[in-house]
Image (spheres, helix red, strand yellow):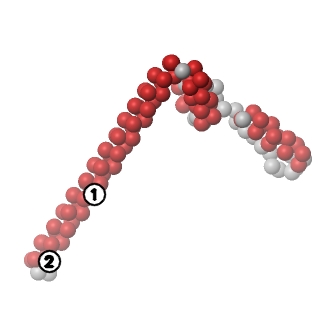
Amino acid sequence: MPAKLNKLIAQKKSLEARIAKEKAKAKQQERKDDTRRKILVGAVVLKHMEHDVSFKHNIEHLLEAQLVKTVDRDLFGIAPKKEISITSDPAESTQSEFVNNIDQNITHQG
């Protein structure tokens, strides 16, 4: 292989490595920026909750509805979500029992 071609291939590899490094750096900065945005929004929301009871209740309702993980719910003093068990096996329940279970679960979640 000619020396010029080898040199170009080496330059290409070097550029590809630099590009990958810059992409990783940009992605890391994006994650840092996203985290900072979340912290700032959270701080603003928490501060506003101190002064606006209606807003506080709305946020509490959103947290109650949206947080699924027990560890997240614990952080806000929200009781864990109840496990929903629905039997779809006809041998274990009738169709009307199955529908009643669904209705009860929807009522308890809403």
Q: Residue at x 60, y 36 (%)?
A: 66
Q: Quadrant where the N terminus lies?
A: bottom left
Q: Which mark is residue 5?
A: 2
On screen, residue 27 versus residue 73, left or right, reads: left
Check the image and name the residue furthest to the bottom: 1
Amino acid type of the residue that numbered disc 1 sits on in the rendered structure? Ala
Amino acid type of the residue that numbered disc 2 sits on in the rendered structure? Leu
Mark 2: give few (<14), some (14-19) or many (20+) Cα within 10 Å: few
Query: What secondary structure is found at the residue carrying circle 1?
Result: helix
Displayed quadrant of residue 42: top left
103 or 60: which is nearer to us?
A: 60
On screen, residue 24 versus residue 45, left or right, reads: left
Residue wearing tag 1: 20
Q: Residue at x 37, y 43 (%)?
A: 31
1 or 2: tag closer to the N-terminus = 2
Q: Residue at x 73, y 38 (%)?
A: 84
Identify whether 56 is placed above or below 19: above
How many marks overall?
A: 2
Displayed quadrant of residue 33: top left
Identify whether 51 is placed above or below 71: above
The residues bearing labels 1 and 2 have C-alpha atoms spaced at a distance of 23 Å
Identify whether 33 is placed above or below 61: below
Residue 27 percent coordinates (x, y): 33, 49
